[in-house]
Image: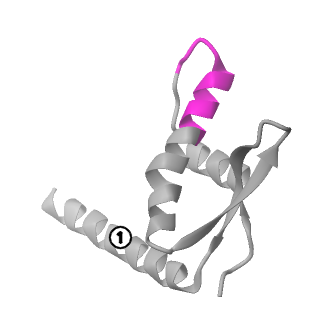
Protein backbone atom coordinates (compact mmCIF):
# COMPACT_ATOMS: atom_id res chain seq x y z
CA UNK A 1 0.00 0.00 0.00
CA UNK A 2 2.67 2.50 -0.96
CA UNK A 3 2.34 5.64 -3.05
CA UNK A 4 4.66 6.11 -6.10
CA UNK A 5 8.41 6.22 -5.54
CA UNK A 6 9.91 9.57 -4.60
CA UNK A 7 13.42 10.24 -5.91
CA UNK A 8 15.86 10.75 -3.05
CA UNK A 9 17.98 13.25 -5.01
CA UNK A 10 14.92 15.35 -5.90
CA UNK A 11 13.57 15.16 -2.34
CA UNK A 12 16.93 16.14 -0.81
CA UNK A 13 17.45 19.00 -3.29
CA UNK A 14 13.96 20.40 -2.61
CA UNK A 15 14.40 20.06 1.16
CA UNK A 16 17.80 21.78 1.12
CA UNK A 17 16.52 24.60 -1.11
CA UNK A 18 13.16 25.11 0.63
CA UNK A 19 14.72 25.19 4.09
CA UNK A 20 17.54 27.44 2.90
CA UNK A 21 20.20 25.05 4.20
CA UNK A 22 23.68 26.33 3.44
CA UNK A 23 27.17 25.35 4.41
CA UNK A 24 30.13 27.41 3.26
CA UNK A 25 32.46 24.42 3.11
CA UNK A 26 35.54 24.67 0.86
CA UNK A 27 33.99 21.99 -1.37
CA UNK A 28 30.33 22.44 -2.24
CA UNK A 29 30.19 18.83 -3.48
CA UNK A 30 31.26 17.71 0.00
CA UNK A 31 28.73 20.08 1.61
CA UNK A 32 25.90 18.72 -0.55
CA UNK A 33 26.87 15.08 0.09
CA UNK A 34 27.07 15.76 3.84
CA UNK A 35 23.63 17.39 3.89
CA UNK A 36 22.20 14.45 1.90
CA UNK A 37 23.78 12.01 4.38
CA UNK A 38 22.20 13.97 7.24
CA UNK A 39 18.78 13.84 5.56
CA UNK A 40 19.10 10.06 5.27
CA UNK A 41 20.22 9.57 8.88
CA UNK A 42 17.97 12.13 10.60
CA UNK A 43 14.79 11.98 8.50
CA UNK A 44 14.51 8.99 6.17
CA UNK A 45 15.92 6.18 8.33
CA UNK A 46 13.74 7.07 11.37
CA UNK A 47 10.65 7.31 9.12
CA UNK A 48 11.57 3.91 7.72
CA UNK A 49 11.93 2.43 11.23
CA UNK A 50 8.37 3.57 12.01
CA UNK A 51 7.14 1.98 8.74
CA UNK A 52 6.09 5.36 7.35
CA UNK A 53 8.28 5.05 4.26
CA UNK A 54 9.93 2.15 2.45
CA UNK A 55 13.49 2.88 1.31
CA UNK A 56 14.64 1.72 -2.13
CA UNK A 57 18.32 0.98 -2.67
CA UNK A 58 20.54 0.65 -5.70
CA UNK A 59 23.82 -1.24 -5.96
CA UNK A 60 26.90 0.58 -7.16
CA UNK A 61 29.63 -1.19 -9.15
CA UNK A 62 31.28 -4.33 -7.84
CA UNK A 63 31.88 -2.76 -4.44
CA UNK A 64 28.23 -3.51 -3.59
CA UNK A 65 27.81 -0.22 -1.78
CA UNK A 66 24.13 0.39 -1.25
CA UNK A 67 22.81 3.89 -1.77
CA UNK A 68 19.28 5.16 -1.44
CA UNK A 69 17.63 5.63 -4.80
CA UNK A 70 14.31 6.78 -3.43
CA UNK A 71 11.48 5.85 -1.15
CA UNK A 72 7.81 5.02 -1.12
CA UNK A 73 5.43 6.80 1.20
CA UNK A 74 3.21 4.16 2.75
CA UNK A 75 -0.52 4.78 3.27
CA UNK A 76 -0.08 5.25 7.01
CA UNK A 77 2.81 7.59 6.23
CA UNK A 78 0.56 9.96 4.31
CA UNK A 79 -1.75 10.25 7.30
CA UNK A 80 1.22 10.66 9.67
CA UNK A 81 2.74 13.47 7.61
CA UNK A 82 -0.61 15.26 7.26
CA UNK A 83 -1.02 15.19 11.06
CA UNK A 84 2.56 16.37 11.50
CA UNK A 85 1.88 19.36 9.23
CA UNK A 86 -1.30 20.13 11.19
CA UNK A 87 0.68 20.06 14.45
CA UNK A 88 3.33 22.32 12.94
CA UNK A 89 0.70 24.82 11.83
CA UNK A 90 -0.82 24.82 15.32
CA UNK A 91 2.58 25.39 16.94
CA UNK A 92 3.29 28.19 14.46
CA UNK A 93 -0.10 29.82 15.21
CA UNK A 94 0.50 29.51 18.97
CA UNK A 95 3.94 31.14 18.63
CA UNK A 96 2.50 34.07 16.69
CA UNK A 97 -0.27 34.55 19.25
CA UNK A 98 2.33 34.83 22.04
CA UNK A 99 4.06 37.77 20.34
Tell me what residue is drawn at x 46 percent, y 66 percent.
Answer: 49
Q: Secondary structure at mark 1?
A: helix
Measured as percent of width and height from the top left, residue 93 is found at 27, 68
Residue count near mark 1 (Cα–Cα under 10 Å), binned few <14, some 14–19, many ≥20: few
- The image quadrant where one finds the N terminus is bottom right
Q: Quadrant of residue 65?
A: top right
Examine the structure image and report whether residue 61 is included in the region drawn in magenta.
Answer: no
Residue 19 appears in the picture as rendered: no
Chain part drawn in magenta:
24-36
Chief SS of the magenta region: helix
Q: Quadrant of residue 30?
A: top right
Tell me what residue is drawn at x 72 percent, y 56 percent.
Answer: 57
Measured as percent of width and height from the top left, residue 32 is found at 63, 32
Out of 94 and 59, give the one closest to the viewer: 59
Measured as percent of width and height from the top left, residue 44 is found at 53, 57
Residue 12 appears in the picture as rendered: yes
Q: For this view, does 62 lie left or right of residue 98?
A: right
Q: Is residue 43 above or below residue 91?
A: above
Out of 6 and 50, give the one closest to the viewer: 50
Q: Is residue 91 above or below residue 23?
A: below
Reading the image, the residue beneath label 1 is 89
Amino acid sequence: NAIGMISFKDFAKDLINNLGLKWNAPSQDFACESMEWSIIQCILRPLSCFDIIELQYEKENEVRVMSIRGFYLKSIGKLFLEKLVEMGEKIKADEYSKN
